[in-house]
Image (tube, coloured by chain):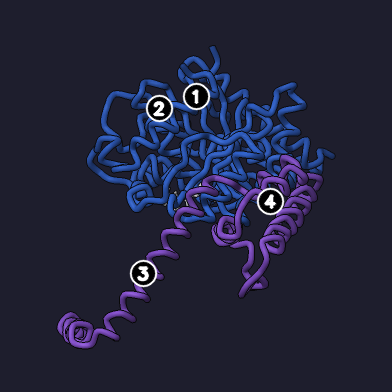
Chain colours: A blue, B purple
């Protein structure tokens, strides 16, 4: 069975997309799910979280990055590459036997999009077609490693880049992390519409788009109120990820392996509960 | 430093309360009123529970208005407080139950219409 493909995406920045990808990937991997994380964000946040800065530099020097992988399609002078040769294997700083691999991003990744636009627009492709082309190339890359994974998770950049669009186009499920406040909820309306259109084109239904409440402060009445509104209007995971110091600290790579509980502290059980719900929704049981 | 100062201040108050019955009575009244108001507010808050004006409004404006007429002024105030429905303090002072209810309906209606526009967008 080919892996489930899931995009974690929101037009709004700083809502916890990368944090969600990293913690979900680690939790599921500990539970025995074989996970591949693909970093589509030039900020490279999830790459740093899961590979650590030293390995990230090393991978970059070896040309094992998403930029190197896609370069072959946009630059004529580059060598053909396989996805499997660009991956970082066994990443994460959580202890235990697991299959958690990663395709890192770098700040240079933003040039791929520019080069692609320059080159393919000249060939009379429009932006949507370029997005679709990346979606097909990415899907083909996943197909080439499909026996190795149960789940492919995309960490999307904020805004809507061509790659974020491509990720939406090819993903079977979409997770939209959001802070339960007014401005964040506004962002969901238009963005969700975009995701819904993609699902409908593939004859998928709305139950493939799920909102995850993040940075939740249980005693904040605005958060309570907005969370209730979100639940009334959209598909929302029951589990809400709390705002905690330890989740923020977990973003920093640690050299010694630690258990999930040591890494996420009191929030670990909440994260596990979210992972459980996620598995149920995407059919990873 | 501050703890000693405060202890000194409170000692003046407790000494006065012991020595001066009129003062002691005034203190009791103030505290009793606070306790009463606080308890009533808590009861109202508990009774409105998870009642969410925007969600209820979306289920149907008329049913929503009917629900509000069943609530007393304290409960209506509790909804307004909890959801910050009166940030400009238009409802300051003594306001009728009816005025409180129609204020809630009005805010919910506007909010719902704004949200509907976003859905169309
Ligand atoms: N539940 C949480 N509790 C505390 N801090 C959090 C939580 N989730 C995320 N953060 C912190 O908030 C910041 C933004 O999180 P993150 O990078 O995951 O968001 P993002 O949506 O991926 O951002 P971007 O849009 O820039 O990609 C980070 O510093 C992160 O550590
Ligand atoms: Mg991010």
Would you say the residues marked 1 and 3 are in contact, meaning their CB atoms lie under 8 Å apart?
Answer: no
Left/right of residue B120 with respect to residue A205 in the rendered view: right
Q: CA distance from mark 1 to mark 4?
A: 52 Å
Q: Chain of mark 1?
A: A
Residue B50: % across, % down: 54, 45
Residue matched to label 2: A28
Residue matched to label 4: B69
User: What kind of element bears circle 3?
Assistant: helix
Asked whether A50 or A232 is in front, the reply is A232
The residue sitting at 46% across, 16% down in the picture is: A285
Residue matched to label 1: A151
User: What kind of element bears circle 1?
Assistant: strand
Would you say the residues marked 1 and 2 are in contact, meaning their CB atoms lie under 8 Å apart?
Answer: yes
Q: Chain of mark 4?
A: B
Please indicate, yes or no, whether residue B103 appears anywhere in the rendered image: yes
Q: CA distance from mark 1 to mark 3?
A: 62 Å
Give the mark nearest the N terminus, 3 or 4.
3
Q: Is mark 1 within 8 Å of ligand 2?
A: no
Label placed on residue B32: 3
Mark 2 or mark 3, whichever is nearer to me: 3
Asked whether A155 or B104 is in front, the reply is B104
Q: CA distance from mark 2 to mark 4?
A: 50 Å
Q: Quadrant of the N terminus of chain A?
A: top right
**Residue placed farthest to the top in the image?**
A1
Residue A173: % across, % down: 60, 28
| Above or below A267: residue B100 | below
Give the mark nearest the N terminus, 1 or 2.
2
Q: CA distance from mark 3 to mark 4?
A: 30 Å
User: What kind of element bears circle 2?
Assistant: helix
């Amino acid at each position: 069975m080919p892996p489930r493909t899931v995009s974690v995406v929101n037009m709004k920045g700083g809502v916890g997309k990368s944090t969600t990808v990293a913690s979900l990937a680690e939790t599921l991997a500990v539970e025995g799910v074989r996970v591949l994380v693909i970093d589509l964000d030039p900020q490279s946040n999830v790459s740093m979280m899961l590979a650590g800065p030293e390995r990230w530099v090393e991978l970059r020097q070896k040309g094992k990055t998403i930029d190197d992988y896609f370069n072959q399609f946009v630059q004529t002078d580059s060598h053909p590459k396989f996805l499997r040769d660009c991956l970082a294997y066994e990443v994460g700083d959580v202890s235990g036997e697991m299959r958690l691999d990663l395709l890192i991003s770098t700040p240079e990744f933003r040039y791929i999009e520019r080069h692609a636009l320059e080159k393919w627009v000249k060939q009379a492709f429009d932006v949507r077609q370029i997005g679709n082309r990346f979606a097909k190339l990415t899907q083909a890359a996943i197909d080439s490693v499909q026996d190795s994974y149960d789940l492919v998770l995309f960490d999307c950049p904020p805004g809507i880049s061509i790659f974020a669009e491509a990720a939406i186009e090819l993903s079977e499920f979409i997770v939209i992390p959001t802070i339960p406040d007014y401005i964040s909820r506004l962002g969901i309306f238009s963005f969700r519409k975009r995701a819904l259109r993609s699902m409908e084109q593939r004859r998928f239904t709305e139950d493939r788009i799920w909102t995850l409440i993040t940075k939740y402060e249980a005693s904040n009445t605005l958060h309570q109120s907005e969370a209730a509104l979100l639940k009334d209007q959209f598909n929302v995971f029951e589990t809400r990820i709390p705002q905690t110091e330890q989740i923020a600290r977990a973003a920093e790579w640690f050299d010694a392996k630690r258990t999930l509980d040591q890494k996420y502290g009191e929030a670990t059980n909440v994260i596990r509960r979210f992972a459980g719900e996620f598995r149920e929704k995407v059919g990873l049981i | 430093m501050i703890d000693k100062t405060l202890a000194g201040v409170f000692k003046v108050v407790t000494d006065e309360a012991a020595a001066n019955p009129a003062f002691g009575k005034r203190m009791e009244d103030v505290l009793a009123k606070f306790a009463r108001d606080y308890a009533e507010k808590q009861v109202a808050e508990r009774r409105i529970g998870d009642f969410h004006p925007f969600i209820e409004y979306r289920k149907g404006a008329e049913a929503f208005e009917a629900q509000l007429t069943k609530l007393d002024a304290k409960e209506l105030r509790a909804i307004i407080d909890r959801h910050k429905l009166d940030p400009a303090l238009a409802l300051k002072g003594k306001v009728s139950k009816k005025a409180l209810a129609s204020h809630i309906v009005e805010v919910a209606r506007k909010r719902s219409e704004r949200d509907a526009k976003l859905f169309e967008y």
